[in-house]
Amino acid sequence: MIMAILEFRTRVCELYQKLQLIIDPIFKFLLAFVVIRSLNTVIGYDARLTRPVILILLSLISAFAPSSVLVFLCMGLIVANVYSVSVILAAFILIIFMIMYSFFLRFTPQYGYVLVAMPVLYLFKVPYLLPLLLGVMASPLAILPTICGVFLYYMIYVIQNAATMELGTTADDVMLLFSTVIDTLLSNKEMLFTIAVFALVIVIVFVIRRLQFNYSFEISIGVGVVASIFGLLFRNSILQLDYNTASMILFTILSGVLVVVIYFFKRILDYTAVEHVQFEDDDYYYYVRAVPKIRVGVAERSVKKFNESILRKSIIQEVEEEDDEEELFNTKELDRRLLEKRTKEAQMRERYMQGIEDFEEEDDNEEFLKENEGESKQLKK
Amino acid sequence: MLNNRKIRLMTKLALYEKKQGKEDIRLSKYYRGDFVRMELLKTLVSVTFGSLLLVVAAIIYKAEYLIAEATRLDYAAIGKTLLGMYIILMVIFSILSVVGYTVKYNMSRKKLAQYFRLLKRLRKMNSEEKPQENEFYLMNENAGEEDTMQ
């Protein structure tokens, strides 16, 4: 089983290294296509903007641009679409975007994509994926864009309602529109609860992942899934929302699995990407293609604790296995074995450290020789 | 003749400069105090801007009430509340950004230390290849080090 996974991993790495130049833009193109397409289905008010040509053009742009461009395009698209329905509403959305940026988003430009991803994942019924993923891969700072993302999702729905109101541009209408939108947003307790739950999940997953014990990564995702489910159940019961509980639980678990898969691929692909760099010195220009070596082997972290109580327990287990019940309660025997085990471990550790030192010394010697060479040359001069 | 060790070193340096190093090297142009103060200033400006937008939105939201009660409103009290809220916001964001950007700067410094060590090694290699320029390089190196240490 493990061997099969490793083989699969190696093959994925090799394939990716070969086709990297094609795969990267295609993936980004598809991502942008899905995002813009789903935005169009939800608030595609302007027929000119929802034409396939525009869709493909925008996707192409974001395929070759950094991810922040896609976020910017989406924001512009939302404003432009709403503009065709109501100028006032568009101005309002613009103000909200600017407030979001000046208070939250400018601190975390690297997580800008979260803002767009949240509403889209809501459409695919797996918004639970994002907090889990951010807890695993990012820092708690990612809470800021998550807040904005959830807010944006609920705002899009309010916009949908407001857009059907068909109001004019007289002062009364403007104020009515404004107060309706703000009232519905501020009185939306579901949104606030969701933000709180997602923020909590991010923090929980982050903290558990950073703790030092075996399988902390897997456990953090498991706990995150459970926390997310219970948090949302709590929200539904307090606010008496009648969402389908079974599908929520199912999709949250699915999100957990997806996070594991995404993380698996991300970790592979991050360290297998071929890099091209250029530099020069006095004599040459260098065009270097750096291909990372693919290693077959599992990089697993295991934490060993040299703790009195654990040692004692393991010795007791050993004694139990030896079926020597009398000795189990004999503390002197226990201490003797403890001492024996400690000495053995200390010896092993010493030998290990010796090995490392030898290795380092070799390296240093080489450096030292090189350095001295330079100096002696200097002296000769 | 091609020097393989040197190429390996230069590749490592170029990779760092191309990816994470970009930001670190940008930060290395500032002293810590300057960098944190500059970012703090940016934060304060953006928070002020955001607060103004919030106030505008609030005025439009409450426009009906404001116009109806325009003569009877206690403007001093409203002003004081708004100012108080603004100051609280400013203080919170200032503290957070000072702490955050200081941590960011320190972390980039740590990564840069390794980069400078490799650069130093590269300089040494260069000076071995071309001993005439040795003195000049070493002088430069020492001057540069003092700058970065501060």
Image (spheres, coloured by chain):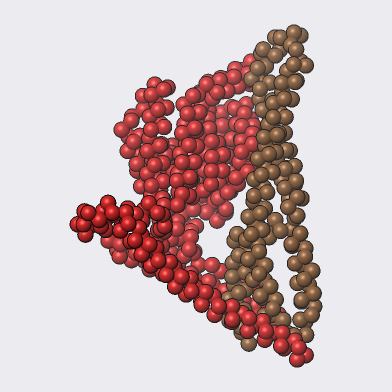
Chain colours: A red, B brown
Above or below B120: residue A342: above
Tell me the quadrant of the picture where the C terminus of chain B can be found.
bottom right
Q: Residue A183, position in %: x, y?
A: 56, 20
- The residue at the far bottom in this view is A380
Tell me the quadrant of the picture where the N terminus of chain B can be found.
bottom right
Q: Residue A356, position in %: x, y?
A: 49, 73
Residue A366 placement, left or right of B53: left
Above or below A332: residue A125: above
Residue B98 seen from this side: yes
Residue situated in front as seen by the camera: A248 or A59: A248
Q: Residue at x 33, y 30 (%)?
A: A245
Quadrant for residue A174, please give it: top right
- Count up the numbered dots: 0
Q: Residue at x 38, y 67 (%)?
A: A344
Q: Residue A324, position in %: x, y?
A: 21, 57
Quadrant for residue A234, please give it: top left
Residue A277 placement, left or right of A230: right
Residue situated in front as seen by the camera: A307 or A115: A307
Residue situated in front as seen by the camera: A342 or A141: A342
Q: Residue at x 51, y 26 (%)?
A: A158
Q: Residue at x 64, y 15 (%)?
A: A172
Residue A45 seen from this side: no
Residue A360 placement, left or right of A230: right
Q: Residue A272, position in %: x, y?
A: 46, 65
Above or below A269: residue A259: above
Residue situated in front as seen by the camera: A130 or A30: A130
